[in-house]
Image (spheres, coloured by chain):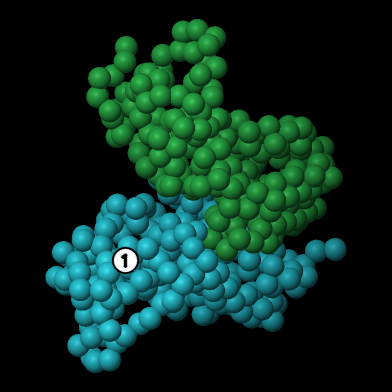
Chain colours: A green, B cyan
Amino acid sequence: MRPKVFREKCTSKYNLIVTTAKGTATRHRIVEAAAAEIRERGTLATTLDDVCRRSGTGKSQMFHYFPEGREQLLLAVTELEAARVFDDQQPYLNELTSRAAWEAWRDVIVTDCRTRGLHCPLGVLIADVGRYSPAAQAVTTQLIRRWQDSVRAGIEATQSAGEAAPHLDPDRTAAAIVTAVQGGVSVLLSTGSADHLEAALNLCLDHLLSPARE
Amino acid sequence: MRPKVFREKCTSKYNLIVTTAKGTATRHRIVEAAAAEIRERGTLATTLDDVCRRSGTGKSQMFHYFPEGREQLLLAVTELEAARVFDDQQPYLNELTSRAAWEAWRDVIVTDCRTRGLHCPLGVLIADVGRYSPAAQAVTTQLIRRWQDSVRAGIEATQSAGEAAPHLDPDRTAAAIVTAVQGGVSVLLSTGSADHLEAALNLCLDHLLSPARE
């Protein structure tokens, strides 16, 4: 089914039609091209024409894979970038059991963000894409939840190992840590500096890894 | 001096010509109208035409006060919203000396953000406006610095009163707290929930207000 009309706007239904290996490859090429454009130029400046040009696909192909247009493509980019963000945090994210492991994880995040600066995929992921529609909000909510679950599992493992403050609520603490990273990325996007990201993560880790009190 | 050309784009020079009380009032009306449009519809959807319509001014008047166009107006809105954000935090922000004072301040921020949701001026202030140009980055960097200085003064006062952990670096801790709020607002913009804001602020305050250790 190829849509007859050129639709830039998102509607409520997301149809994805991929039937062949070649089709999957084409769709992947379009998403990769969109991700690269967004990393270089930002979400706002990236048009469907840019993505077609970069991926070497035509508008009709684009709308075959993304019949809902721009927003559907942005969500696919968000999912791709989210997978990358999770990959970048491995194996650290899944092995958070000691102060050394938490600090290695922190260093990966801070270094990544400092290096990528304004093109940090985390920034693209949530700050830019997150607020445009209920569909986008659902995707980002789910990504934050998934990320927070990984961090919470690390907190629980560290508590079990006796290296984290046992009185802390793992899920609330994980929420605070995810928020600290998000805030650090937001300040980085505004100021160009990753110092706030580092300060916020350090405070969270000091709190988490402090000995039991009272 | 009225510019002859209609300029939507920002250039490097910001000239502000306000000579009379009436002129000041007109400029203020334009900025207030722009702020209201942005709160209702977001930065992206707000055009200069919308602002002219809402403020009852013509394009030539608009470009008399904002010869650099859209971005210059956005920066004026950022400054207005920043002043509001500081006002909203008073008198709490200037009286941070005890756990009760910090919690009252936290409650004002969380309640404000929860109530305003997607129209939280803090969100407009930094997430939207902050990254478009060096001029915008300079303004947001300065605003974050000013806010962080107020929080740092509160930390120092609370440490002097013996109610905050004395070993914490006041400026780094203030940076972490400002980042936590920024992250909470960012997650709020992405998910519609202020829970992360609250969790992050609670972790920071628990860490700040914990008794001395080691």
Relative to A24, B192 lies left or right: left
Q: Is residue A127 above or below residue A47?
A: below
Furthest-top residue in this view: A20
Q: Position of residue A1 (x, y in %)?
A: 32, 12
Q: Residue at x 73, y 66 (%)?
A: B211
Quarter-wise, where is residue B27 in the image? bottom left
Name the spot of residue B188 as percent of width and height, x first. Answer: 44, 49
**Residue drawn at point x = 73 percent, y = 50 percent:** A111
SS of the residue under disc 1: loop
Residue B209 % position (x, y): 66, 66
Q: Amino acid at mark 1?
A: Arg
Q: At x 31% / y 15%, what residue is drawn?
A: A2
Side of B108 where B69 appears, left or right? left
- Is A32 rendered above or below residue B81? above
Where in the figure is residue A164, as x and y percent of width and height? 77, 45
Would you call the spot at circle 1 few (<14 residues within 10 Å), some (14-19), or many (20 or more)? some
Quarter of the image that includes the C terminus of chain A? bottom right
Which residue is the extreme one toward the front? Answer: B4
Please state if A203 lies on the left or on the right of B69 as rendered: right
Whether residue B73 is visible here, answered yes or no, is yes
Disc 1 marks which residue?
A: B7
The residue located at (57%, 35%) in the rendering is A81
User: Along the horizontal axis of the image, is B21 left or right of B140?
Assistant: left
**Host chain of mark 1:** B
Depth check: give the residue in front, B199 or A213. Answer: B199
Q: Compared to A10, does B77 lie above or below? A: below
Which of A196/A168 is in front? A196
**Which of the two residues, A78 or B99, is positioned nearer the viewer here?**
A78
Q: Is residue B191 visible?
A: no
Q: Residue furthest bottom?
A: B20
Q: On the image, which quarter does residue B115 sit in?
A: bottom left
Q: Which residue is nearer to you in this view: B197 or A194?
A: A194
